[in-house]
Amino acid sequence: MKEIIGFLYENQDEKYRDFQAKLIPDIDKTTVIGVRTPVLKGYAVQLVKEGRADEFISVLPHKYFEENQLHAFIISREGNFEKCIEETEAFLPFVDNWATCDQLRPKCFAKNKTELLKYIDKWINSGETYKVRFAIGMLMCHFLDDDFNESYLKTVSAVKSDEYYINMMIAWFFATALAKQYEKTLHFIENKALDKWTHNKAIQKAVESYRITDEQKEYLKTFKIKTRD
C-alpha cells in the first residue's frame, strides 16, 4: 500500500488537485492528491498485470480520492461477471462522491445484462445515494438501446430523493433516453412525471444534446416549468 501511495504522490499535479477538489465539494480536499485520470488508468492496468490488484482492492476503506478512482478502474477491467459483482458490491458502500461512482463502469456488465438487472433493482431501492446513482447509471449505459424496455423509464421516474447527485443522474438518464428513445420517453416529460427541478434539468440537458433535432428541442422547451427566483 505504501508503494501505491508513493506512486500517486510521485504523479501529483497540484494545480490539477485544486481543480479536481472544486469539482467534488462533498469530499475532504485533503484527501485529493491530484493525479490525472490517464495516469490512474495506466496504473490500474499495471497492477492487474503484476497480480497486485486483488490485494489493493481488498483493503477498504481507502484514505485518498485517487485510491478510490484506482479501485474503480481495476473493477471496471474485471472480465468475470461473478467476481466483478462481488467486487462491486464490496466497494459501493465506500463510494462517497459522484466522480468515483461514474468512473465505475465494469465492461463485463454488457455481456451479462439479465443477471445485472437483479442487482440494479437492489441498488436502486437501497436508499443509499451512490448505490442509487450507480444503478441509474447502469440502466443508462446498458438498457437504452437494443435491450430497452419502457419499464426502465418507470423505474427511474419512481425514484424520489432530495439528493442532488441522485436527481442529476435521473435528469441525465432521461435526457439520454430522449436522445435514444424519444417517442417512448416523451410522455414522461409531457406528463411531468419527474419532480420540478429534475424535470427542468432533463429538458436542459436534452436541449444541449446534438442527438436531438432542433424541432424536438423546441417542443421540449414548451414543457419547461417556470420557477420563482
Image: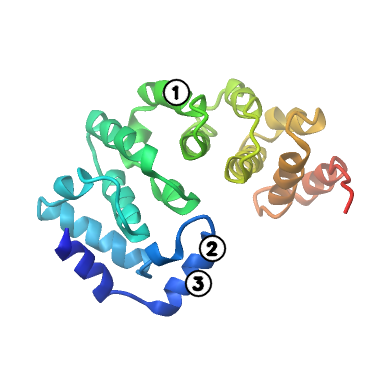
Task: Tell me the residue at 35%/68% (across/down).
Answer: 33
Give the residue drawn at x 34%, y 28%.
Answer: 112
Whichever of labels 1 and 3 marks the residue nearer the N terminus, that label is 3
Q: Which residue is mark 3?
A: 19
188 vs 138, left or right, is right
Q: Is residue 105 visible?
A: no
Viewer-side residue, 62 vs 110:
62
Q: Position of residue 165 (x, y in %)?
A: 58, 45
Residue beneath disc 2: 23
Q: Residue at x 33, y 33 (%)?
A: 89
Q: CA distance from mark 3 to mark 2?
A: 7 Å
Residue 92 visible in this rendered orientation of the protein: yes
Cα separation between marks 2 and 1? 29 Å
Identify the image quadrant of the N terminus. Answer: bottom left
Residue underneath mark 1: 122
Q: Quadrant of the C terminus?
A: bottom right
* Front in this rendered view, residue 200 or 215: 200
The x and y percentages for residue 103 are 41, 50
Left or right, 92 with respect to 188, comes to left
Amino acid, disc 1: Lys
Please name whichever residue, 24 or 203, is drawn nearer the observer in this view of the structure: 24
**Amino acid type, label 3:** Phe
Disc number at residue 171? Answer: none
Q: How is the image coloured?
A: rainbow
- Secondary structure beneath label 3: helix
Badge 2 crowding class, 10 Å Cα cut-off, few under 14, some 14 to 19, many 20 or more, is: few
